[in-house]
Image (spheres, helix red, strand yellow):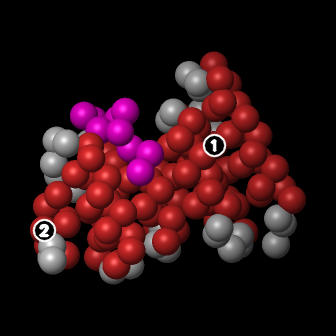
Amino acid sequence: MITFEELIQDLKSTDPAIRDKAALDLMDIGDDRAMAPIIDAIRVPENVNYRGTLVYALSDYDCIEHLEYLVELCLTSNFEVSSCSFNIIEGFELTKAIIKRIKSEMLKYNENELRYEHSMDARNALSNFISTNRV
């Protein structure tokens, strides 16, 4: 059986299949120590086209400390990463502070800077989420 530490090392693999399997195995384990290494793997520039499963693997973790990064991913990434990021954000219990953090991050991206067609849909979904779930 592969150890927790070996799975963390596999997140650094250049092979997307190895990284994805490690991320999903870590998700199944549910150890909060895995969240930061998964985030680190998502941030690796060489992984930019292979982040969907890594972001999905965060969905069982309490990622509130990474809220701004999730909003960024939601607005600036491919459809899979954007959708996974939004699903995680949608699971947060909104407070005034969280709404403020989401709005603040959204303000960093105007319509002209959003490179994907679905990015405006993601922006609208975030806006609807925070406006229909007022605290």
The vertical placement of 56 against 60, above or below, is: above
Q: Secondary structure at mark 2?
A: helix
The magenta segment is 45-53
**Quarter in which the N terminus is drawn:** bottom left
Please give the label number shown on residue 106.
Answer: 1
| Residue 68 visible in the snapshot | no
Q: Residue at x 47, y 56 (%)?
A: 56
List the residue tagged with mark 2: 6
Residue 72 falls left or right of residue 38:
right
Q: Secondary structure at mark 1?
A: helix
Residue 3 falls left or right of residue 80:
left
Kind of residue at disc 2: Glu
The vertical placement of 79 against 83, above or below, is: above
Tell which residue pokes out farthest to the front in this image.
1
Q: Residue at x 82, y 72 (%)?
A: 135
Kind of residue at disc 1: Met
Please give the label number shown on residue 117.
Answer: none
